Amino acid sequence: MSTTDLYRIFDEARKQCPNPFTLKSVISSDEVWGEVMTDLPSLNQHIDERISDAIFEIRKKYSNKIGIAVKGDRGTGKSHVIHRIWKNIAQEGGSVFAYIGPCTNPKRINSHVRFYLADSFNHQDIQGVTQWQKLAAAAIKSLEESEFKDKYSQYIQRCDSPNELKKYIIASQNKDTLLSFFDELVEAILENQPGIDSDFLRALLFLLLKSVKSAQIAFAWIKGEDHPEIKKLGLPEFLIDQQEDKSIWIIQQICKLAEIALLPVLICFDQIDYAGNDSDSGDSGSQIIAKCIDKIYFQCSNVILICCVISDTWREIEQMGSGIPDRVGQRSVTAKPPTAEQIIELVKLRLDWFYKNNNLNSLDYPNLYPFNENKIRNVANQSAGVRSLMKWCAEEFEKGVIPPDKPDPPGTLEDKKKKDFLEKYNELLSNQIDIPIKDDDKLAAIISCAMKMIPDGGTENVVITKVDKISDASHDLHLTVSGYDSLHQRNIKIGIRVSEATNGKTFNAVMARLLDYKKHDITRGCLVRSTSVPKNWRVGNQLKDQLKKQQGGEVVVLKKNEIKPLVVIETIYDQAENYGFDKEEVTNFVKDLRLVANNLLICEILSAPV
């Protein structure tokens, strides 16, 4: 087939097929449970890791409840993270997951959360088992260590396969005996699990049966809906006002039962900025949801409460009193915009979908056709996020496609040197390289070197004007970074100290100097450390809390995979002549390629704590 024919076929497909860059550019609530068109696991992987760590802590009972605020502007991939969390749970188990969508009636917020949680637990994993079935089977399996083990042995041994257990119950019980069977089972389970409510447990056991009528009635009761046959299952009926009051109680029961199965309960609140305001209290939608999260936090254990917020929304929550922001955002993690390389990969994924759906071979066309890679990079560097880039791609894709009739002109000498630099950078990055993870001064020097290679336009809304090394006096700051915060329209000066101290007194001395904002005239302090401050360092933890909560500073976690690229950059810079460059060229290449500007560690240091 001639080249002309190939481009003609592509253009015909472009006209007839949906534009791949307008399809599902935003994750909806339905897609959280299904498949997304383009998901890049490396994008915001640090958030996945933070949530995985929380699940591990709850399961091991190191903590009994954790609030996590996932912050980030629209289009930075927060909802993609939620999708991946559920997908991982559906494949591997280990916890149960609920997705809470936007609430339109602030006076029924508790009932709203209860409804969505109940509905979420009806979703099936890859074995076709609902989360309700997992919990019901776990309740029955708890009889394994009880005096009722022999009586219910045939049921207990099927608990690891809830659908087999369901079939066995249906086969061994009829409509007349099913109610009394579950009543006896409830009594047996409560002998060893007295903290569970008998009515809730009875309803839960019916959910094991999935789609039979009694299960549908029990499901309506748990969701807080009316059903004419609720009393037939021996379940109490509640008025509408009572249902609102009972909602948090139902969530509490779910968390208690999940704890028996060692399954932490993840409740994820998304799109909270779309919630309706309360005209009576004057609370914004986000503040109403924050109060609900806080109530769940107080009354439940074995729970992880994830709240996805944009910066403006978080500022509303931050203004609330009674310690609500400290619990909702007990831990916080920020979604980051994709790097240029990740942007290229996202565009490629969309194009691959187009090629596949039109039986085209991507190898027959230039890389990223019909786009130019350099143009995509330029747009990516100027755009506010993935959504704006997708909009640009969608518009370009709609234009008439002109096949390239001649090869691109050879690149300039500077382009070739930049390509050579990138190859050496990637080669070093893929090799084993010594990371001085316990050398505070060396780590600080690496960060200082990197800060000087941020483009003139800045990153994380901060334009760098000056980077100063502080004297080598023991325990003092390592460096200060001066600049202008364009988001908050103010000058800033960040004092940075790296401290991997393993001695409490040394750490206290470091923190005392970091908290002395007047000495170096800093606007906020930043502690960089790879390990958490030991819980038995009472004074150290008090000083850390003072930095974060009273003086507007932050503690940034130093991760090997984030510092490694900066080690590589410093290595090439220090030995520039050996690599065939001069130092100015290295600085310019790093700026142009945004290798520092998009580095997660640097972004975390520069971004204002929210």
Image (tube, grey):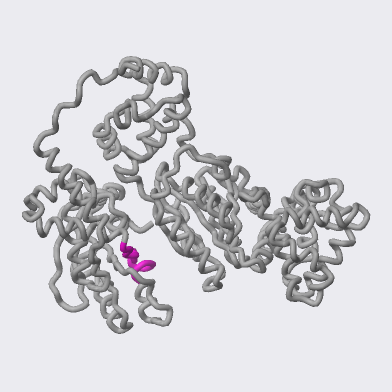
Q: Where is residue 359 in the image (x, y as percent from the top left)?
A: 45, 25
Task: State the residue lying farthest toward the front.
Answer: 1
Front residue of this view, candidates 258 and 575 = 575
Q: Quadrant of the N terminus?
A: top left
Q: Is residue 303 left or right of residue 599?
A: right
Residue at image coords 31%, 63%? 560
Residue at image coords 6%, 54%? 577
Asked whether residue 99 is drawn in magenta, I would say no
Residue at image coords 40%, 78%? 534
Front residue of this view, candidates 340 and 147 = 147
Asked whether residue 557 is drawn in magenta, I would say yes
Q: Quadrant of residue 403?
A: top left
Q: In which quarter of the image is the C terminus?
A: bottom left
Q: How many marks?
A: 0
Q: Is residue 366 visible?
A: yes
Start and end of the magenta stretch? 546-560
Q: In this view, does 196 lie to the left or right of 94?
A: right
Q: In this view, does 414 lie to the left or right of 297?
A: left
Q: Quadrant of residue 160?
A: bottom right
Task: State the residue lying farthest toward the right.
Answer: 176
Q: Where is residue 235 in the image (x, y as percent from the top left)?
A: 83, 57
Q: Can residue 269 be seen in this view?
A: no
Q: Is residue 507 left or right of residue 114?
A: left
Residue at image coords 36%, 68%? 550
Q: Position of residue 392 (x, y in %)?
A: 35, 29
- In the picture shown, does residue 276 fall above or below 467? above
Q: Where is residue 535 in the image (x, y as percent from the top left)?
A: 43, 78
